[in-house]
Image: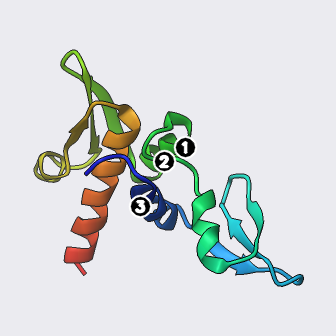
Amino acid sequence: MKASRELDVKMAGLMGCYAKQDFTGTWDLIIPNGVNQINFVNKNDVWSGVPAYSTDISAAWPIAEKLRLFVLPWGEHEWCATPKRDATLAFREFSASATAPLAICLAALKVMEDENESR
């Protein structure tokens, strides 16, 4: 998977972002511990305001903290991210990418998949 707004929206859900209609009838994107994006006319447009998790390290880093990911340089031109858990899970949820933000997002997707499978 490549860095994309679709991936950013998935990460926004993980981080607890949600749409809320205010008293004027416009929609706001509520970003916990972030800067809310406000006054969208259409509810679907709200999601265009999510942070660029898959391309911006300052947006992606809170994901790494929330999921307790190790984020390390891998080789000369890549980054890897993996959970701070037992070796079996770490290997299965290991993700590498050309950028640290994308590696974090890909590892987060694997963690989310693993949690969904265990339910």
Which residue is found at the position 22% from the left and 15% from the top?
76
Above or below, 97 relative to 62: above
Among the two numbered marks 3 and 2 on one chain, the one whose residue lies closer to the N terminus? 3
- The answer to whether residue 92 of the structure is visible from this angle is yes
Q: Label 3 sits on what residue type?
A: Glu
Choose between 94 and 9: the one closer to the eye.
Answer: 9
- The answer to whether residue 17 of the structure is visible from this angle is no
Choose between 96 and 21: the one closer to the eye.
Answer: 21
The reply to whether discs 1 and 2 touch (Cβ–Cβ < 8 Å) is yes
Which residue is found at the position 63% from the left and 58% from the top?
49
Q: Marks 3 and 2, Cα distance to the nearest angstrom?
A: 10 Å
Q: Element at badge 3?
A: helix
Q: Label 1 sits on what residue type?
A: Ala
Which residue is found at the position 62% from the left and 70% from the top?
45
Among the two numbered marks 1 and 2 on one chain, the one whose residue lies closer to the N terminus? 2
Q: Give left or right: position of 90 versus 66.
A: left
Write down the residue under mark 2: 53
Q: Quadrant of the C terminus?
A: bottom left
Among the two numbered marks 3 and 1 on one chain, the one whose residue lies closer to the N terminus? 3
Q: Which mark is residue 51?
A: none
Point out residue 117 in the picture as x, y percentages from the top left corner.
20, 75
Write down the residue under mark 3: 6
Which residue is found at the position 88% from the left and 84% from the top?
23
Point out residue 60 in the picture as x, y percentages from the top left corner.
48, 43
Above or below, 22 relative to 55: below
Write down the residue under mark 1: 59
Q: Label 2 sits on what residue type?
A: Tyr
Q: Is the residue marked by circle 3 packed among few (<14), some (14-19), or many (20+) residues within 10 Å?
A: few
The reply to whether discs 3 and 1 touch (Cβ–Cβ < 8 Å) is no
